[in-house]
């Protein structure tokens, strides 16, 4: 049994089953999530008898297997991680000067099938467990040898974006549990302000993110009208824009309007990138505290779309900025290793 992914309470009850006192759970938590140890032998404060018991009981702290690691010229790193049942996901690290974000996956494939997304063209296989979700981050840290957990100021793997394969709000309980483990102050301790969860718009679950987690929210908006959105994001037929915007409003009622929502907008040539689209977009989000993030469309083989021209993207951004919205253009990273937004896909889906 892998201990990664158990909540504190669950870890404590495992230890109690072995006749151990509650404070042992606190110590073990520290070794697992702060020190990042994988080997019980090294957990000196636990005492030899307990260490032996943990080993004899068959507990592990295994990470997923690293099937492949690729590094791009811009230092973006992508891993293909394989779990016990042979299923795999991709995880990406996007470095900046002295810090960077780990982009975590939540599902093997994605059931949503957005037409511009490479992951969406892969068959959905299953949800990740909370343990698998957390283990991705730990394996990324292993890869950079960043243990024990450094202070906020000095850590290289400083931020998390839940923007990899899959729709996090269709696997909410596991993602929530995983993020709670990652945010725990006595372990990995990444603060909620450094975590952004991106959703394609599972409206009923959006307020829960503010209630339960308090992390930042990004919404894959991508279209100003239901007519356009229906065509490129099938989930819009289930939760149309009115519902999505209402859910965002609720999110801000709970989280406060200082909690800006990032509206992601993929720039698709001739589909959603006209001046009229920009104006419609501003009407749509009126009253919400939002900033935009324009994402140049990343192409993948077999995809019917093209990216808007550089001029078009700049003009679209300028229109939004004239009306006092922040609308930076996301710099594409890791494209040549297919690590950029919307490019992740694993072998299972290519079969
Ligand atoms: N399922 C979640 C999390 C994935 S985040 C979501 O959809 O929000 C990945 C981001 O990249 C989303 O905003 C997604 O819409 C966007 N994206 C998908 N395919 C893309 C592509 N080919 N080029 C650029 N962005 C893409
Ligand atoms: Fe799934 Fe997000 Fe890709 Fe849509 S954009 S298919 S929701 S991963």
Image (tube, grey):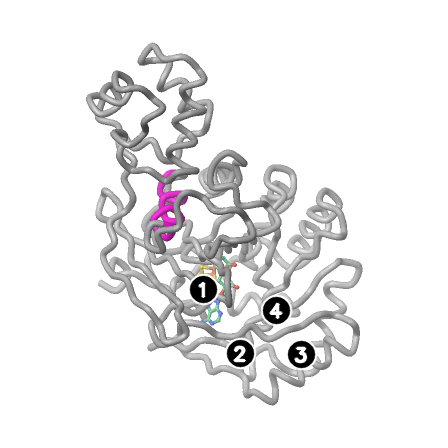
Q: Which residue is drawn at 45% across and 39% down?
A: 174
Residue 4: where, in percent of width, then height?
36, 35
Whole-number angstrom distance, CA of label 2 to CA of label 4: 14 Å
Quick one: label 4 or label 1, which is nearer the N terminus? 1
Q: Which residue is drawn at 46% across and 67% down?
A: 341
What SS does tag 4 mark? strand
Q: Nearer the viewer, mark 3 or mark 2?
A: 3
- Rendered view: 146 above or below 46: below
Residue 272: where, in percent of width, then height?
59, 77
Q: Residue 332 carries which label?
A: none
Q: Which of marks 2 and 4 is in front?
A: 4
Whole-number angstrom distance, CA of label 3 to CA of label 4: 9 Å
Residue located beneath label 4 in the image: 293
Which residues lie in the magenta part?
A: 131-141
Q: Nearer the viewer, mark 3 or mark 1?
A: 1
- Snapshot quadrant of residue 22: top left
Classify 10 Å Cα crowding around label 4: few (below 14), some (14-19), many (20 and above).
many
Q: Which of marks 1 and 2 is in front?
A: 1
Quick one: label 2 or label 4, which is nearer the N terminus? 2
User: Contact, CB < 8 Å: mark 4 with mark 1?
Assistant: no
Q: Residue 268 carries which label?
A: 2
Residue located beneath label 3 in the image: 317
User: Contact, CB < 8 Å: mark 3 with mark 2?
Assistant: no
Residue located beneath label 1 in the image: 94
Q: Which residue lies furthest to the left in this view?
A: 56
Whole-number angstrom distance, CA of label 3 to CA of label 1: 23 Å
């Amino acid at each position: 049994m892998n201990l990664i992914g158990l909540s504190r309470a669950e870890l404590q009850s495992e230890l109690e089953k072995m006749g151990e006192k509650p404070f042992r759970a606190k110590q073990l938590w520290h070794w697992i999530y702060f020190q990042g140890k994988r080997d019980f032998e090294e957990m000196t404060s636990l005492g030899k008898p307990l260490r032996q018991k943990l080993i004899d009981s068959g507990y592990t702290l295994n990470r997923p297997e690293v099937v492949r690691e690729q590094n791009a010229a811009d230092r973006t790193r992508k891993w293909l991680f394989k779990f016990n049942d042979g299923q795999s996901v991709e995880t990406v690290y996007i470095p900046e000067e002295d810090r960077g974000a780990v982009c975590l996956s939540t599902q093997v494939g994605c059931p949503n099938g957005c037409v511009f997304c490479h992951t969406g063209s892969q068959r959905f296989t299953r949800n990740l467990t909370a343990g698998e979700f957390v283990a991705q981050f730990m394996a990324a840290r292993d890869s950079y040898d960043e243990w024990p957990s450094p202070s906020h100021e000095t850590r290289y793997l400083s931020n998390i974006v839940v923007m990899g394969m899959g729709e996090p709000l269709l696997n909410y309980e596991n993602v929530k549990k995983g993020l709670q483990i990652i945010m725990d102050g006595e372990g990995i301790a990444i603060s909620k302000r450094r975590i952004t969860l991106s959703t394609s718009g599972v409206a009923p679950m959006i307020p829960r993110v503010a209630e339960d987690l308090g992390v930042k929210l990004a919404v894959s908006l991508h279209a100003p009208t239901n007519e356009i959105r229906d065509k490129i994001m099938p989930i819009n037929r289930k939760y149309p824009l009115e519902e999505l915007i209402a859910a965002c409003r609720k999110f801000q009622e709970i989280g406060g309007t200082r909690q800006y929502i990032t509206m992601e907008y993929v720039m698709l040539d001739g589909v959603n990138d006209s001046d009229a689209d920009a104006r419609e977009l501003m009407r749509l989000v009126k009253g919400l505290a939002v900033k935009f993030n324009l994402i140049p469309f990343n192409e993948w083989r077999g995809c019917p779309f093209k990216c808007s021209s550089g001029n078009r993207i700049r003009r679209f951004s300028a229109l939004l900025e004239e009306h006092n919205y922040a609308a930076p253009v996301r710099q594409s990273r890791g494209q040549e290793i297919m690590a950029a937004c919307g490019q992740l896909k694993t072998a299972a889906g290519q079969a």
